[in-house]
Image: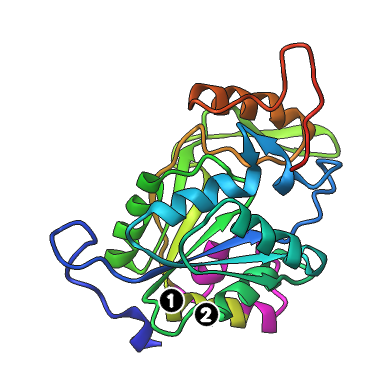
Amino acid sequence: MSGLFRRKTSGARDGTPLPKCAVVVAAAGASTRMGRDKLFLNLGGAPVLIHSLRVFDAARAVSEIVVAVRQEDVQDVSELVRRYGIKKTVKVVAGGATRPESVHNGVMAVSRDAEYIAVHDGARPFVTEKLLMDALDAAVKHHAATAAVPVVATVKRAEGGVVQETLSRDGLYEIQTPQVFQAELLKAALTKALEENAPITDDCMAVEALGCPVYITPGSRENIKLTTIDDLPLAEAIAAMRGGTPCVSATGTTYTAW
């Protein structure tokens, strides 16, 4: 594995040319907990998925975008990309039955000359170029990095509904995306995880299993992941604060699909 762990001597912002970074957007979930397909919900005047695609489309370091979606959504997402004028090359591929399978399918569709691959949740519409670049800078130096925010809530471990202990918050982080990796490292890590049917919940876990440390970069409290219907009012507020058109009115107007 030594070839995967060559250390770069320069970062992405020190005046040297930016490394080629592809972005894989994981968007093949069934939105079961949301009760509707969250990627197509209108948020601030555009579908949820389009918000992150616009950021990556504008980011200088991003060479291409791959979106992994459900097989039945491939045509609709391809049309969405055209409709909203995403200029960079966007490949829309069918995901798999699980998130690791979907990300693996997306990663394998990335051009061979990509040096780094960023993985982002399609249900995180408020990513920024700074979040991406901070993680990319760290990945250039350390091979693997992820956006994260410190845990601020009190966390307890329970068994059978009974608290067993209160965990110290020191050193605990809520992991977000983008997560950025040296391309060959991520490919090897995901392939191994799938071969071993490893129960990974994010791509960092696959890389960690190879013995590669993952570095933390500053995330954002606004970089929320839309999971349940309860997340939508906060998303509305963030979209309005950023200048978009709220997707739900104060009177409770239903969210609309694109």
Residue 90 horizontal/vertical position (percent): 54, 67
Determine whether 41 is above or below 189 in the image: above
Check contact, mark 1 vs mark 2: CB within 8 A.
Answer: yes
Determine whether 91 is above or below 84 in the image: below
Give residue 72's quadrant in the image: bottom right
Disc 1: which residue: 183
Q: Nearer the viewer, residue 97 or 87?
A: 87
Instruction: Tell which residue pokes out farthest to the left in this image.
Output: 15
Disc 2: which residue: 187
Residue 135 horizontal/vertical position (percent): 37, 55
The three-letter amino acid code for the residue at tag 1 is Ala
Determine whether 215 is above or below 225 in the image: below
Q: CA distance from mark 1 to mark 2?
A: 6 Å
Where are the magenta residues, as a range? 193-211
In the rendered structure, the answer to whether residue 92 lies left or right of residue 188 reads right
Give residue 1's quadrant in the image: bottom left
